[in-house]
Image: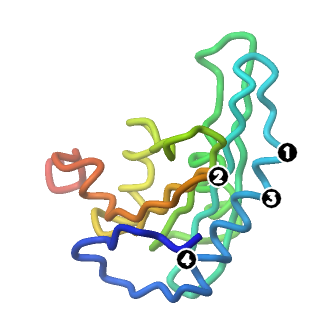
Amino acid sequence: MPPKKKARGSRAHLSPQRLRRLVDAASRVRERAYAPYSKFRVGAAVGSPAGKVHAGANVENASYGLCLCAERAAVAAAVAAGERRLDSVAVVSSSEVPAPPCGMCLQTLLEFGGPDLTVILSSPSRCQRFALGELLPHAFGPRFL
């Protein structure tokens, strides 16, 4: 399903094919999520400016504070592959309304993509597109250091 909301101020034009690759990768990895407690499986895929895609799924733990969100798992996979700059992320869940990344994930995405990073949120019934800065408008970043 194509995104309905266009990211404002996005520095990178993402083709429909590239967006579909991200959503497809996030959908596939979502099936591998480890969510025995919440049963809420999430998949995420991040994209680099070169078009590479790295995916991650949420990993829960009986000690809830140790859970790993899908978005941060995808960023970690990208970093492990040598990426240092990201331009997009797709997050896929089964909720009726597409689930946005938590604050910790938004902050992590900001570190590697900045406020113009394209965020695609997808659920079975709809897909939305944002710029990261729309979801985290008053972000803490390097300018404060």
**Residue drawn where x is 43% and y is 54% of the image:** 109
For marks 2 and 3 on the same chain, the one whose residue lies earlier in the sequence: 3
- How many angstroms separate mark 2 from mark 1 (CA)? 17 Å
Q: Which residue is mark 4?
A: 48
C-beta proximity under 8 Å, tags 3 and 4 = no
Q: Which residue is mark 3?
A: 28
**To which quarter of the image does residue 69 belong?**
top right
> Element under label 3?
helix
Q: 144 above or below 60?
A: below
Q: Which residue is mark 1?
A: 32
> Element under label 2?
loop
Residue 47: % across, % down: 57, 73
C-beta proximity under 8 Å, tags 2 and 3 = no
Specify the amino acid type for callout 3.
Arg
Q: In the drawing, does residue 110 fall left or right of residue 144?
A: right
Specify the amino acid type for callout 1.
Arg
